[in-house]
Each structure stands twice: as structure tokens, then as C-alpha cells.
Amino acid sequence: MADLSSFPITQKWPPAEPDIIQLYSVATPNGVKVSIALEELGLPYEAHKVSFSENEQKSPEFTSLNPNGRIPAMIDPNGPDGQPIGLFESGAILIYLAEKTGRLIPATARERYETLCWVMFQMGGVGPMFGQFGHFHKFAADKVTNNSYPVERYRDESKRLLGVLEGRLKDRQYLMGNDYTIADITTFPWIWCADFYYGGREVLEYDRFPAVMAWFERCMAKPASQKGLTVPA
């Protein structure tokens, strides 16, 4: 049995099965990326819910694994050298899982780096901009009643990024062509979130991006996506 006692986070969220991957997360667009990938890869894992209402992501136990205090974080008891490894940042975790299994990422160096470009496009663009749009459109709407600039700025940038995706997906099934990769997994949850959680479908004019919407539906239809979107419950 794996010994995870060197990870203080396990004191707050004790593992029932320490020999399998331990996921610390909640069902946000960043959080579900990892659960979707784990489901798609068929890797056994144990999910621990990190309560935002109780600010658990800022607890000493959680920040011992991710000093930035953001979900998701993960422990793999079977790391690259056979020893447990702790990981944080959703993009880094997806890359790790893809390389660990040799799946969801192309085998050739050229296509691998191209995939990583699209992963970083989401991490540096889609996620931050959609997140700021959601903040001002939904959560801080009362604070910007007399100032439309924040909503307009992030709305317009989010639409611009949707346009970039539209151009990429116009003649492709997935971001890397016919193959579903971590580039898709890291990106489509934000399209879901902006609609389902932020109520932004009409404001972001999703109907103007038919290739994005068709790709989004393909990603959402996967059984692993449907399961992963609900983890942790």
C-alpha cells in the first residue's frame, strides 16, 4: 500500500484507497478537465471535494500541495520514478496524465508541440478571459451597473477567442484533426461553463460559431465527459 503520509493534504482528506490517484477538486471548468481526462483514460482515482464555501482551497493542508490555493491538485502514488508525486495546475496535470499513459497526445514531436500550443492557448487566453467575463457578467453585475467597460472588454475578448477556435475547427473534428486530445479536454469545459454557469450563450453569440458548437457537442457527448463534469459531486 502506498504511503502518502508525507503529503499534509491527506490529513484533511484521508485517502480510502491510497494506491490510486487522489484528486482534490470541485466541478468548475478547471476542475472537471482532470476528472474528464481520468475518465477518458480509465485510470482509477479517488475524488475529494474542496469546498469553496468553507475556503478549503486556502487551507494549510491544501496549499501544502498547491501554494497558489487553486483547484485542481492531484497526487499520483505511482509517479515517474515509482514514488508518489504531487501536481497542481490543470494544464500541467493533463500533460502529465497524457505522457504517463501515452494517450490523448500525439506521438510525433511536431504534433505534440502543436497540441501543447492549443493547451496553452486555453490556459493563457480562454480560461482567464471567459472567467473574467463570467465574473463581471454574473457575479459582479451589481458593481458595474454604471460602468459597462468591464463586461464589454471581456465579452469582446471572449468572442474574439471563439473566433480563433472557429477558424481552427472549421474543417476539423477536434483541435488536432481527427484525434481527441488534451487540447480539447482543456478547452471545451469553458464553453460549457460560459453557457451553463455564467448564462452567457446569447451575450457571447454562440450561434455565430457553428464549428465551435459542433465540436463542443462532440466533446460533450462522450461518456467520459458526462461523468467527469459531475466530479466531485
Image (cartoon, helix red, strand yellow):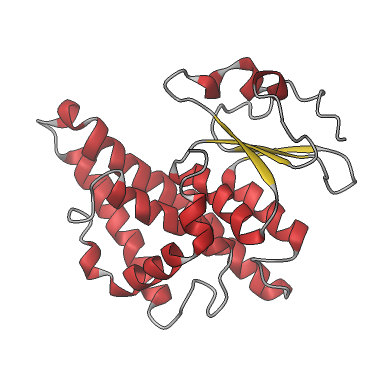
Residue 194, placed above or below residue 184: above
Q: Nearer the viewer, residue 32 or 164?
A: 32
Q: Residue at x 60, y 55 (%)?
A: 39
Is residue 121 something one can see in this rendering?
no
Q: Residue at x 50, y 47 (%)?
A: 32
Q: Is residue 194 left or right of residue 42?
A: left
Residue lying farthest front?
16
Is residue 224 something one can see in this rendering?
yes
Q: Residue at x 48, y 25 (%)?
A: 51
Q: Is residue 186 left or right of residue 149?
A: right
Residue lying farthest left?
146
Residue 73, placed above or below residue 105: above
Please count the marks in the image. 0
Residue 80, placed above or below residue 138: below
Q: Nearer the viewer, residue 220 or 139?
A: 220
**Image quadrant occupied by the N terminus:** top right
Q: Residue at x 28, y 70 (%)?
A: 209
- Image quadrant where residue 219 sits: bottom left
Residue 61: image x %, image y %? Answer: 65, 19
Residue 97: image x %, image y %? Answer: 70, 54
Q: Nearer the viewer, residue 104 or 220?
A: 220
Residue 139: image x %, image y %? Answer: 26, 32
Q: Is residue 12 left or right of residue 221?
A: right
Q: Is residue 144 left or right of residue 100?
A: left
- Image quadrant where residue 172 sits: bottom left
Residue 156: image x %, image y %? Answer: 24, 53
